Image (cartoon, rainbow, N blue to C red):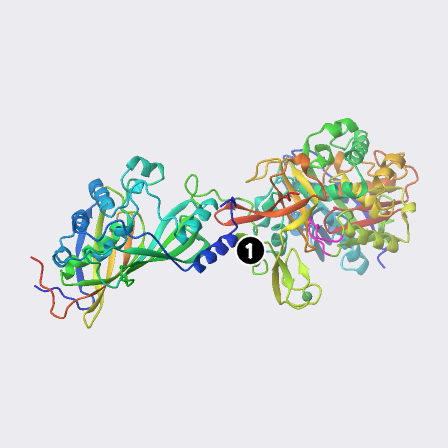
């Protein structure tokens, strides 16, 4: 069944358990070697509860959340993210979203990624979707 | 780099200077856009979108990944942002948290092309009181260019550099001034590292402490001048007893006669008590008492 | 003119202590009764009441406790101890103008066992009233105690005139010597030496502990009525030959650091000019001066502002001519607030009355005119009281 891209259409939720493996592997895949993203002792010494997601990963996960829904033919034009509370290892990051506007193939999606402490990331993603609606994946 | 601590005004001056540098190019990415790094990235993200490797492009959110420094490498020293962040560290704003990341993708980067970043410092705002403490918002943009000089992606990035509290929230300094619309300009000034003296907008008479109406000409049109911050010690006391909340005894308080001709009261700091002397030259220094209060104080003018 | 129209016909006080063990209202009521007894009047005679704006006991409360009925005049005088002589000035005005026939002035507090003025109050600069804003230029810097406020003037005075801490000390030593022979004084039998003054601990340099007056619990009340009526009462009247209040240009509560000069007390100069003019007297005509002595340096400044010596000459005046009982100008024969008690200057007015009656503990000979001053460094007041 094709995804709806009319205004207010909701995106399927994406929930991720933030295992240390996920936090560390994404930090390294984005080439962010800052110790607070892989060294728990040092992260705690600097006042953090644990290691936490780096921003490049947050951007990547927002992109994934939207393309998981919009499908391979969607072209991402812009991602605006306002960063909130840290997403610590051991927490769960849940993305929700809805279509804010859709006109002539240009779609704006409002995105919100929450953790137990509150909003980790909120923002909008702008994408182009070809006129023929994408098929449901798989 | 030798100045131990800049005032807020000096920080803004530095920021303006860095912004005036315009776009500063960094080193090109060490590797061209390549499939192994894309595959690695997608696996880590759990991103199963087949379009990237199938069509030979990178996920757009990887834009910054291509030019990240490796472990042990320093972030790009040529960046106009570096000096501002270092000055903020010296100002005591050692905490950092990113607040905004906005990326625009002109097109997807293609396998085999090597991106070059260029950074432009755009804005410093503050000091502002935030939930984390008092701090400054620093904003810059990075554009990644392809070898043909065309921009592939752009990013606006904003961080809050804040003064971290030592043990949870800062203990509030108990000796607070009352402030109203007649005096707010003064306290706003010290927060920004300015010693402001009320000046009558009509007759020019300077006045401290300030008030709502010029006692010389009856004008209520007020402005202020920023004092040079230099003066002499007109009188002083050394407080020993009783204990004063928020203070360690003994401490010195002086009446300072400013070059501008008005007097002002403030603590004399960085001076042994037995070196205090009526007539000694002083210059202003601004001391933060807590998240919300900066006080102008006085330190001996070096000969 | 006010001169000669009113008189103090009665004085009363509680004991002076460090812990009265009673409420301030009870102290006020006791002192008022004592003053009425002294005058030979009853509560029914009283139709006016005046106190300090800082007093915690409202006039109506004191009237209720003492059985005073209707009041046709009540008033409060501002600015801490600067109110002292002002209460008598207001009472004398009321009597002279017919607003009231008999006015009681009182001051009652547990200043030692209750709220102590010498304790820092972090909230002084808290409210954006004119006084809160004024304090806000000082309090944030830890300049929060009366001793420190006064010390700022004292340092400048020392710088300008070469005065020393010993010059301040000689005032303290004299006051304590007077108190030593006044049974009502807290420091009765306890004189001090200049060396003890010099070695007492710092409070706010340049002020030592013994430059600062004590803190006391107690109350004093005065009965003011017309001079004519006073002559028919129990004791010889202390006639109000002059009464004045004064504040200077650029005046602040206790931090007038922004005026041209910091070595004087311009508000006391205002009072002095009015007192001499109204009484027709000169400094040579008074046999004793009751000078407000919460801190020693301002006793020197007052001698200058009141015309007993020239500017900067007070240290020499005290050292060479003397302010003791046998000095050129006996100051505070009761021991002042440094020696007798700190009742915000009200006990000094009572001493002036006793000197005029001839009933003081350290009675001087031939007293016909006494000068009294109120709080220094604040907007203030003064009296010249005379016999007959
Ligand atoms: Zn003017």
Q: What stretch is highlighted in magenta?
A: C250-260
Q: What element carries label 1?
A: helix
Quadrant of the image occupied by residue B166? top left
* Residue C268 place in picture, x, y as percent: 79, 50
C312 in relation to C171, above or below = below
Which residue is nearer to you in this view: B10 or C329? B10
Quadrant placement of the C terminus of chain B: top right
* Residue B107 place in picture, x, y as percent: 23, 63
Which residue is nearer to you in this view: C151 or C99? C151
Which residue is nearer to you in this view: A36 or B18? B18
Q: Mark 1 points at which residue?
A: B189
* Residue B187 place in picture, x, y as percent: 56, 54
B271 in relation to C245, above or below = above
* Residue A99 place in picture, x, y as percent: 21, 65
Would you say B94 lies left or right of A28 here?
A: right
How crowded pointer 1 is (Cα within 10 Å; few <14, some 14-19, many 20+) is rated as some
B229 in the magenta segment: no
- Residue C34 seen by the camera: no
The quarter of the picture showing ligand 1: bottom right
Q: Please tell me whether the stretch drawn in magenta is mainly helix, strand or loop.
A: loop
């Amino acid at each position: 069944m094709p995804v709806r891209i009319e205004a207010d259409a909701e995106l399927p939720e994406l929930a991720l358990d933030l295992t240390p493996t996920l936090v560390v592997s994404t930090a390294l895949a984005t080439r962010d070697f800052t110790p607070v993203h892989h060294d728990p002792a040092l992260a705690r010494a600097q006042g953090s509860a644990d290691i936490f997601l780096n921003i490049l990963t947050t951007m990547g996960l927002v992109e994934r959340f939207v393309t998981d829904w919009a499908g391979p033919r969607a072209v991402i034009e812009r991602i605006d993210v306002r960063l909130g509370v840290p997403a610590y290892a051991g927490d769960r990051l849940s993305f929700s979203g809805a279509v804010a506007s859709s006109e002539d193939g240009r779609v704006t999606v409002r995105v919100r990624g929450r953790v137990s402490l509150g909003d980790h990331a909120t923002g909008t993603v702008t994408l182009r979707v070809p006129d023929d609606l994408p098929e449901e994946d798989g | 780099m030798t100045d131990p601590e800049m005032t807020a005004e000096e920080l803004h001056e530095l920021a303006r200077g860095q912004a005036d540098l315009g776009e500063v190019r960094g080193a090109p990415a060490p590797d061209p856009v390549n499939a192994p790094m894309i595959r690695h990235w997608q696996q880590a993200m759990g991103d199963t979108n087949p379009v990237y490797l199938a069509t030979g492009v990178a996920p757009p959110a990887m834009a910054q990944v291509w030019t990240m420094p490796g472990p042990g490498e320093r972030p790009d020293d040529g960046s106009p942002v570096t000096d501002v962040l270092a000055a903020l560290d010296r100002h005591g704003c050692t905490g950092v948290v990113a607040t905004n990341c906005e990326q625009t993708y002109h097109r997807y980067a293609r396998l085999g092309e090597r991106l070059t970043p260029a950074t432009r410092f755009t804005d410093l705002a503050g000091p502002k009181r935030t939930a984390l403490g008092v701090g400054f918002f620093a904003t810059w943009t990075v554009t990644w260019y392809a070898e043909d000089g065309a921009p592939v992606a752009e990013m606006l990035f904003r961080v809050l550099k804040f003064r971290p509290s030592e043990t949870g929230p800062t203990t509030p300094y108990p000796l607070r001034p009352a402030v109203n619309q007649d005096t707010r300009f003064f306290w706003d000034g010290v927060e920004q590292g300015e010693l402001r003296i009320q000046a009558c907008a009509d007759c020019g008479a300077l006045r401290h402490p300030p008030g709502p109406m010029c006692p010389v000409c009856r004008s209520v049109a007020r402005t202020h001048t920023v004092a040079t911050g230099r003066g002499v010690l007109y009188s002083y006391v050394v407080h020993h007893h009783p204990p004063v909340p928020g203070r360690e005894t003994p401490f010195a308080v002086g009446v300072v006669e400013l070059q501008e001709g008005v007097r002002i009261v403030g603590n004399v700091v960085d001076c042994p008590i037995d070196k205090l002397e009526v007539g000694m030259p002083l210059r202003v220094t601004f001391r933060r008492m807590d998240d919300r209060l900066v006080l102008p104080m006085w330190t001996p003018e070096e000969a | 003119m006010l001169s000669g129209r009113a008189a103090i016909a009665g004085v009363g006080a509680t004991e002076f202590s460090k812990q009265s063990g009673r409420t301030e209202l009870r102290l006020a009521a006791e002192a008022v009764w004592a003053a009425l007894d002294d005058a030979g009047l009853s509560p029914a005679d009283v139709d006016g009441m005046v106190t300090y704006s800082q007093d915690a006991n409202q006039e109506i409360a004191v009237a209720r406790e003492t059985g005073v009925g209707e009041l046709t005049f009540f008033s409060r005088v501002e600015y801490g101890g600067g109110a002292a002589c002002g209460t008598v000035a207001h009472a004398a005005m009321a009597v002279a103008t017919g607003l009231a026939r008999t006015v009681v002035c009182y001051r009652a507090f547990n200043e030692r066992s209750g709220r102590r003025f010498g304790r820092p109050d972090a909230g002084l600069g808290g409210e954006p009233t004119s006084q809160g804003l004024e304090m806000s230029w000082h309090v944030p810097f830890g300049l929060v105690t009366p001793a420190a406020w006064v010390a700022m003037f004292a340092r400048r005075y020392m710088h300008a005139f070469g005065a020393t801490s010993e010059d301040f000390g000689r005032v303290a030593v004299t006051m304590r010597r007077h108190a030593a022979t006044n049974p009502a004084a807290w420091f009765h039998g306890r004189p001090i030496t200049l060396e003890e003054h010099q070695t007492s601990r710092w409070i706010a340099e340049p002020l030592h502990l013994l430059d600062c007056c004590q803190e006391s619990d107690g109350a004093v009340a005065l009965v003011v009525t017309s001079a004519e009526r006073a002559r028919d009462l129990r004791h010889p009247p202390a006639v109000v030959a002059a009464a004045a209040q004064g504040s200077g240009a650029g005046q602040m509560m206790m931090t007038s650091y922004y005026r041209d000069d910091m070595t004087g007390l311009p508000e006391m100069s205002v009072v002095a000019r009015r007192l001499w003019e109204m009484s027709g007297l000169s400094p040579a005509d008074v046999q004793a001066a009751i000078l407000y002595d919460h801190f020693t340096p301002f006793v020197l400044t007052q001698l200058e502002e009141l015309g007993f010596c020239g500017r900067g000459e007070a240290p020499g005046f005290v050292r060479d001519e003397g302010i003791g009982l046998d000095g050129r100008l006996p100051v505070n024969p009761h021991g002042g607030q440094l020696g007798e008690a700190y009742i915000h200057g009200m006990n000094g007015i009572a001493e002036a009355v006793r000197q005029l009656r001839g009933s003081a503990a350290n009675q001087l000979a031939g007293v016909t005119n006494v000068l009294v001053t109120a709080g220094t460094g604040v907007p203030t007041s003064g009296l010249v009281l005379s016999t007959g």
